[in-house]
Image (cartoon, grey):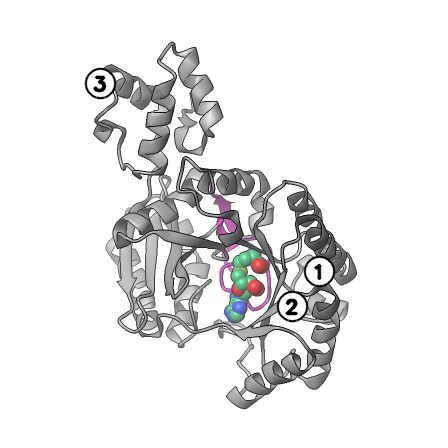
Amino acid sequence: MEQTDIKSLTLEELRREIAEQGEKAFRAEQLYQWMHVKLAERIAGMSNLPKVFREWLEREYEYVTLETVEIQRSKLDGTCKYLFRLPDGHVIESVLMRYRHGNSVCISSQAGCRMGCRFCASTIGGLKRNLRPSEMLEQIYRIQKDSGERVSHVVVMGTGEPLDNYDNLIRFIRLVSHEKGLNISQRNITVSTCGIVPGIRKLAEENLSVTLALSLHAVTQEKRRELMPIANRYELKEVLDACGYYFHKTGRRLTFEYSLAAGVNDTEEDVKGLAALAGPLHAHVNLIPINPVNERDFVQPREKIIANFKKNLEKCGINATLRREMGRDIDGACGQLRRKYLEDSPGVPEDSDIMDSSREHSADSLERGGEDPC
Ligand code: SAH
């Protein structure tokens, strides 16, 4: 029988499970604190729980932890890239970024991705599987433990489409922002989506106050369809209506992500189109010079074009930022790390999956001096 993943349970569920076992109610809180505040790596180390109780927990439940395969630390800005192994052998990446306003962790929501965005490396090997709430939490827990510094912000912008893993995402958000857990403010959590309309509308109803970031990348339905297959499913207008609904329902300011590719979406027309879409929704625009990916033709516009794009957008009254490049000095090493890992591990389970091309490509894109993989 499959064991229940105990770290994905809410405190209320944990209380119920423990009450059913006839254990004292306060044990649930103790256990929750070990998992979600003290970030314990093993049940055995939970010293204030009776030994018999710990043994029962070990028999009955799966205690998910991530194995740290490799960490790369930037000497320039303190950015750290983490390679983690999931319990079934898949490998995922997370990034710690240090800002003046606090430490932010970029997490993956899926192993691989099935959205197929033309410029994105994570999608090349397809979707392996959804991550469970515990596996999303653990990326933050291991990083907080390793750095010894509090994580105050979370961006769900790593590999995967969070709204394609909806229920696990919601559970993750509730756990990570729980006052008896890590207690990260929902206002400091950003969920980035390629534009899954029913997911956006549903998220608006959850009574959460997380920031929604839409990966827009093109200002017309035609161009968006060329870049993002999801646009075949949901028209740009529908996506923007859903974003408007999210904004009105939650009061949370939206972010539009716009990856700039030379000759694709970097003209004056695009500036005007973008301003016309972002203005009425009061959306903040995050410009990301595209990271070149192998087997894809996209290249970054010249510096001057990027700077002008931003300036002209601002002239239209739009609040825009250019995503800062973090951890440039460790990018190159990242590719070497993965290759070395694969060469040294011929017997790893499902190694065809682990060696999926998205990993290789993502490493390649980093080597070319791109910014953080998020
Ligand atoms: N699936 C989610 C989140 C993951 S990607 C989404 O689509 O939003 C995080 C952001 O990086 C998205 O805006 C994505 O479109 C962008 N991105 C992916 N590959 C990129 C690349 N090669 N260069 C620049 N931005 C990229």
User: Which label is found at residue 227?
Assistant: 2
Q: Earlier in the sequence, mark 3 or mark 2?
A: 3
Q: Is residue 258 left or right of residue 66?
A: right
Q: Is residue 58 above or below residue 247?
A: above
Marks 2 and 1: in contact by CB < 8 Å?
yes
- Please provide the residue range marked out in magenta: 109-132
The amino acid type of the residue labelled 2 equals Leu
Under tag 1, what secondary structure? helix
The amino acid type of the residue labelled 1 equals Ala
- Beta carbon of the mark 1 residue lies under 8 A of ligand 1: no
The amino acid type of the residue labelled 3 equals Lys
Q: Is residue 350 visible?
A: no
Q: Residue furthest bottom?
A: 304
Residue corresponding to mark 1: 231
- Place of residue 143 in the rendered image (x, y in percent of width and height, measured from the top left): 32, 51
Under tag 2, what secondary structure? helix
At 30% from the left edge and 23% from the top edge, which residue is drawn? 58
Residue corresponding to mark 3: 51
Magenta-colored stretch includes residue 12 = no
